[in-house]
Image: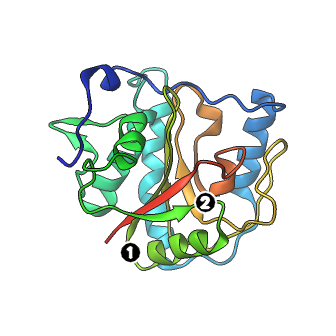
Amino acid sequence: MGFKYSQELRGVLLAVMIVTGCSSAAIAQDSLQCETRKRPAPAPLQVQFESRLQPLKQCVAAVDDVAACNRFVGRALELLFNNSDFKSGSQYLLANDIANGLNTAGNIRGWTKLGEASEQAVLEKAQSLSNEGAQVVAVKTAPRAGHVVLILPGSTERFDLPGFSWGTLKTPNSASFFLNNPERVFVGCPLSATWRSPDGVELYFKR
């Protein structure tokens, strides 16, 4: 296990992200449009990964663990790559544990920082690495509202949501699951559908 984290941090559940100027209903509708938008023809690896991740959407069910969506990245990495870096014993780490762990020196096992999401070259490299079969994640740390997104094989695209500000950046294909916010769960949307802006978002990879 490559992360050191406190019991206090493990006990913190990821706070629901609040998007200024966008209602929950609007976000839900836009996220649906994101998944059903016309996309470039997918590569075989992209189809395989997105298909295998679809069953994890059941984390939004009321009968499931309230933190299940928060543990999505750990579950996804193990499912797709047989990688348990984001797991401690039988428990998958919460998103905030992963985000803060990747950002803290000494807590990383084999993960390399690519750079900031505000740089187009970094976004392109992230997509290229994912297409080559590498494990790539995007993270943003915060005291109680960190979040982690899995980058998927695919193509970089420009995608705008109301109230979001990614400018002309084309972002990689991704999957993002939110705690207690099932209308924002998606598999196969550009990274720009996750955060209001690229500010503070960093990308890491592992071969």
Name the image quarter holding residue 188.
Answer: bottom right
Residue bearing mark 1: 133
Mark drawn on residue 90:
none
User: Residue at 76% of width from left, 51% of height from top?
Assistant: 33
- The disc, 2 or 1, on the residue closer to the chain's N-terminal end is 2
Residue 2 placed where, x, y %? Answer: 21, 49
Residue bearing mark 2: 117
Q: Left or right of 180: which side holds 103?
A: left
Q: The residue under label 2 is which amino acid type?
A: Ala
Name the image quarter holding residue 17.
Answer: top right
Furthest residue to the front? 105
In-front residue for pair 200/127:
200
Where, quadrant-wise, is the C terminus in this rendering?
bottom left
Residue 145 placed where, x, y %? Answer: 53, 30
Q: The residue under label 1 is which amino acid type?
A: Gly
User: Residue at 51% of width from left, 78% of height from top?
Assistant: 128
Q: Secondary structure at mark 2?
A: loop
Q: Left or right of 194: which side holds 2?
A: left
User: Residue at 54% of width from left, 24% of height from top?
Assistant: 15
Q: Secondary structure at mark 1?
A: loop
In-front residue for pair 31/142:
142
Q: CA distance from mark 2 to mark 1?
A: 20 Å
Number of numbered discs: 2
Q: Residues within 10 Å of mark 2 (few under 14, many from 20)?
A: many
Given this view, does label 2 or label 1 mark the residue nearer the observer? 2
Name the image quarter holding residue 162.
Answer: top right
User: Residue at 40% of width from left, 47% of height from top?
Assistant: 103
Q: Is residue 88 above or below residue 172?
A: above
In-front residue for pair 162/112:
112
